[in-house]
Image: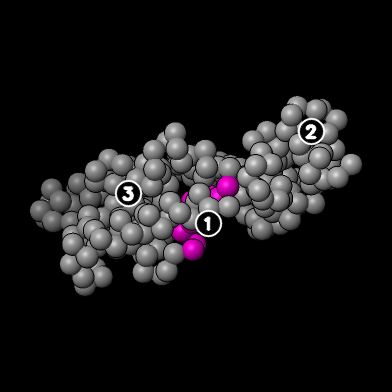
């Protein structure tokens, strides 16, 4: 049976074709899993997560997309593994970081009560008993984990800015991840998106950092968002 015919039957719900397609694409899943070496996870566990992505690709693929099934499936597998690593990582580190945040805040409040100003890193470390690296990690976490769902000052996420949930979330999952769209941007474009949506800075603050006007930042941001829209809906 030709590969595309197998894909069509699997998409139509044929269980034998579905199983065959899963079997034929085990190598594809492993090729994606191998990109995530040295992450502290068993490769077999990541493979199982990748299988979920492949199943989603089979369920959602339509021959009218006019792309090879593997081209369609890889972003789905990648996205599933990345979501797992992100969510699982947050669960593992969240409790410890929150405990450290409590120690840091207690130390800061004590210092400010005594001296009326923010303490330096050395004082917080001595008072809290934490290493400087632990303090930096906890403060960074408190400001917000880098996430495509992070809100900006207008209470809109990057996904919401690029397009509404109904129109774009499905396309992002089915074709390209947001990270792939970001990777296609120029360095300065990536920096603007990072500052605006990951570091939660205003357009005025971004302009100051880049030494350009707020108006210029606004215009560039609109063009970048449009560029990402086009990237994510292109085959």
The secondary structure that dominates the magenta segment is: helix
At numbered mark 1, what does the secondary structure look like: helix, strand or loop? Answer: helix
Q: Is residue 56 left or right of residue 30?
A: left
Q: Which image quadrant: the N terminus?
A: top right
Question: Considering depth in this image, is 114 or 1 the residue closer to the camera?
Answer: 1
Residue drawn 77% across and 39% down?
A: 7
Range shown magenta: 175-184
Place of residue 4 in the rendered image (x, y in percent of width and height, measured from the top left): 79, 44
Question: Considering depth in this image, is 183 or 222 the residue closer to the camera?
Answer: 222
67 lies above or below 7:
below
Q: Earlier in the sequence, mark 2 or mark 1?
A: 2
Place of residue 123 in the rendered image (x, y in percent of width and height, measured from the top left): 26, 59
Disc 2 target residue? 9
Residue drawn 24% across and 43% down?
A: 154
Q: Quadrant of residue 218?
A: bottom left
Disc 3 target residue? 143
Residue drawn 74% across and 29% down?
A: 12
């Amino acid at each position: 049976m030709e590969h595309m015919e197998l894909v069509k039957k699997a998409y139509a719900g044929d269980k034998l074709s579905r199983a065959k397609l899963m079997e034929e694409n085990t190598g594809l899943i492993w090729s994606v899993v191998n990109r995530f070496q040295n992450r502290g996870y068993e490769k077999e566990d990541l493979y199982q997560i990748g299988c979920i992505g492949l199943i989603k690709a089979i369920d959602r693929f339509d021959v009218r997309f006019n792309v090879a099934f593997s081209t369609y499936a890889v972003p789905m597998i990648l996205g599933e593994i990345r979501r797992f690593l992100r969510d699982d990582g947050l669960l593992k580190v969240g409790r410890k970081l929150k405990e450290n945040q409590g120690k840091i805040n207690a130390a800061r409040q004590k210092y400010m009560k005594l001296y009326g100003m923010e303490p330096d890193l050395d004082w917080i470390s001595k008072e809290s008993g934490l290493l400087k690296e632990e303090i930096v990690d906890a403060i960074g976490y408190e400001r917000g984990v880098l996430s495509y769902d992070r809100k900006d000052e207008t209470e809109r996420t990057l996904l919401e800015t690029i397009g509404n949930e109904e129109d774009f979330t499905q396309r992002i999952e089915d074709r390209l991840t947001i990270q792939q769209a970001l990777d296609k941007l120029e360095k300065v474009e990536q920096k603007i998106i990072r500052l605006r949506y990951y570091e939660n800075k205003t357009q005025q603050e971004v302009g100051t950092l880049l030494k350009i006007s707020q108006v210029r930042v606004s215009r560039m941001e609109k063009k970048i968002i449009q560029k990402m829209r086009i990237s994510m809906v292109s085959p």
